[in-house]
Image (cartoon, rainbow, N blue to C red):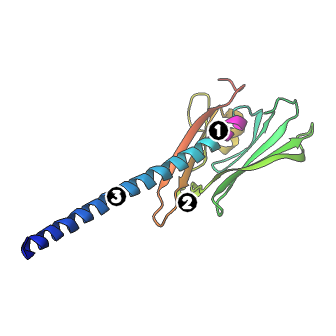
Amino acid sequence: MCIRDSIITSTLMVFMLIIIYNLIHFVNVAYDHNRERSDAVQNTATSLWIYDKYISQNMGIETANGYTFSCFTDVDADNIIERTVFTYNTSAHTISYTVYNTDSNRVNTSVKTTGQIAENVWNANYETPLYTYYNDQGNVITDPEKIASDTRQIKVNILTRGPGSTPKTYSNSRTIYLRNRGL
């Protein structure tokens, strides 16, 4: 084997290694993207389930706008009315909830439970409301004064961002139909 053949063989080996390296890198990037998306979807799916649990059984909306929601519930069917408050912290990018026991005048008497629903929430940064309210005709309610009385369904839309220097934004939403509200 001459030097020329050795150089050609070595050059071909280098090109093959470069191709293999790039292929492995491409597969890893695709895997990371799919894992990141899967994590985001799973996290928001759990969040939306919590929303569904509390909102679908609400007995009256107390406070509602694009980023705040509070309602009265009896989720555990113990005939004690609870106040459930969902809070979106725009600086910490989290959504949490607090459930309060209330007395017959609907005054908070104690904290029943609290928890964080979602993290890495970026709705405010994209000016996308967490909550959109619909009436019995399926039309968006634009008058804030009518949200409490006219809402028959609520769309909860959560935008989350993945980690990294150039994070991707993922969206997951659910339309929740309110029970005992004329539907």
Image position of 117 (left or right of 6)? right
| 52 part of magenta stretch | yes
Residue sitting at x 50%, y 47%: 38
Q: Say what amino acid the circle numbered 2 marks.
A: Asn
Q: Say what amino acid the circle numbered 1 marks.
A: Trp
Q: 154 above or below 125?
A: above
Q: Which mark is residue 125?
A: 2
| 105 part of magenta stretch | no
Residue hosting label 1: 49
Residue hosting label 3: 24
Q: 9 above or below 40?
A: below
State the separation of the CA atoms marked 3 and 1. Answer: 37 Å
Instruction: State the image coordinates of residue 163 (x, y, percent, origin top left).
Output: 52, 61
Q: State the SS at label 1.
A: helix
Q: Nearer the viewer, mark 3 or mark 1?
A: 3
Q: How many marks do you count on the picture?
A: 3
> Magenta stretch?
48-55
